[in-house]
């Protein structure tokens, strides 16, 4: 029997290297754990790091990178808001129109190896592994494109991922979404539909999120938990009695300022643009 089986509360037990973690989940399990990704599993916004990888491969302009870096810094400082997410989504869809799904997925694999794997919170990773070892299904539920969610889920050995679906035709992105952004109440609806399809008992299920926008999905299960919560979610968790787990460095817990890594990314992106402008000016002067 796997550790924790017969009990909805997982014990922290790591799977062996030889055994894929998802293989520990028995068929017909009634218990699942649902994890948000950004700032819950991965420090910062996974889409920003993918954007940097795409930028380095010529997918978009310098100004786009600065915009994404600014959004990343604002997200780390103040948490999510719907208008910010909609702005990023619209620009990202425009950029991705006509691009190959296979190419983007290959780049995402590189970004995971180079960046995302180094930004995973060990505490959240231990929770995820504990659920799998206890025989629970584990799903990532994220507003990030589903291809990225599935990649992270596969690398972590999770059962699968629910994410925003970007439409593609014959292997190329069209620049449109299938349905809406998987965010807020849409996450909760997707989890309820998945639970009905897979036979999960939501009263016995677990959910983890960092933002007040995760309240709908946290409210859907019997065992919610706030991880690295923003101020509003922290207050809500205190009011309703939800447990809180804090895996960030102590200096960042209160979100009193912009995270240094985010600021560094913003400064770096700005410097890239400045250098590009200078090179352009030198070429123009040299051609006179």
Image (spheres, grey):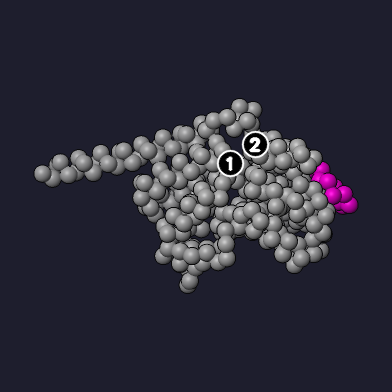
- The magenta stretch spans which residues? 1-14
Instruction: Left or right? Give the position of 265 relative to 152.
Output: left
Q: Residue furthest right?
A: 6
Residue lying at the far bottom in this picture: please name it: 170
Residue 64 in view, yes or no: yes
Task: Return the x and y of residue 92 as percentages of the image width and height.
Answer: 46, 55
**Does the magenta portion include 117?**
no
Residue 89 - label = none
Of the 4 image quadrants, the one containing the C terminus is top left
Nearer-the-camera pick, 10 or 228:
228
Residue 207 at x, y = what percent?
73, 49
The numbered disc on residue 231 is 2
Q: Earlier in the sequence, mark 1 or mark 2?
A: 1
SS state under label 2: helix
**Residue 238 x %, y %:** 75, 37
Circle 1 — which element? loop
CA–CA distance in space, label 1 to label 2: 9 Å
Labelled pair 1, 2 in contact (Cβ < 8 Å): yes
Say few, some or many: other residues with alpha carbon within 10 Å of mark 1 (under 14 / 14 to 19 / 20 or more). Answer: many
Q: Is residue 247 above or below residue 165?
A: above
Q: Residue furthest left?
A: 288
**Lateral position of residue 83 relative to residue 210, left or right:** left
Residue designated by label 1: 79
Residue at x-position 63% and y-position 30%: 254
Q: Report if residue 12 is visible in the image.
A: no
Residue neighbourhood size for the residue with mark 2, other residues' Cα within 10 Å, grouped as few (<14), some (14–19), many (≥20): some
Number of numbered discs: 2
**Picture residue at 57% right of the left edge, 45% below the top:** 80
| Residue drawn at 71 percent across, 59 percent down | 191
Q: Quadrant of residue 235?
A: top right
């Amino acid at each position: 029997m796997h550790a924790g089986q017969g009990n909805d509360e997982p014990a922290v037990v790591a799977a062996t290297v030889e055994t894929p973690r998802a293989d520990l989940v028995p068929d017909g399990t009634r218990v699942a754990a649902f994890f948000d990704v950004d700032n819950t599993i991965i420090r910062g916004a996974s889409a920003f790091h993918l954007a940097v990888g795409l930028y380095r491969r010529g997918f978009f302009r310098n100004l786009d990178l600065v915009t994404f870096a600014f959004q990343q810094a604002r997200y780390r400082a103040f948490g999510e808001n719907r208008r910010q997410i909609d702005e990023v989504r619209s620009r990202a869809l425009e950029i991705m129109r006509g691009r190959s799904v296979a190419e983007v997925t290959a780049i995402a694999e590189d970004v995971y190896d180079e960046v995302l794997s180094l930004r995973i919170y060990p505490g959240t990773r231990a929770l995820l592994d504990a659920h799998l070892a206890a025989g629970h299904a584990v799903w990532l539920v994220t507003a990030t494109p589903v291809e990225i969610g599935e990649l992270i889920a596969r690398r972590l050995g999770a059962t699968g991922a629910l994410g925003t679906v970007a439409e593609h035709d014959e292997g190329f992105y069209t620049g449109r979404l299938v349905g809406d952004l998987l965010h807020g109440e849409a996450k909760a609806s997707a989890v309820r539909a998945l639970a009905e399809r897979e036979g999960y008992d939501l009263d016995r299920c677990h959910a983890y999120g960092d933002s007040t926008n995760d309240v709908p999905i946290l409210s859907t299960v019997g065992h919610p938990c706030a991880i690295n919560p923003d101020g509003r979610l922290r207050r809500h968790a205190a009011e309703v009695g939800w447990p809180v787990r804090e895996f960030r460095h102590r200096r960042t817990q209160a979100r009193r300022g912009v995270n240094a890594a985010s600021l560094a990314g913003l400064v770096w992106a700005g410097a890239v643009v400045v250098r590009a402008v200078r090179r352009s000016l030198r070429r123009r002067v040299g051609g006179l």
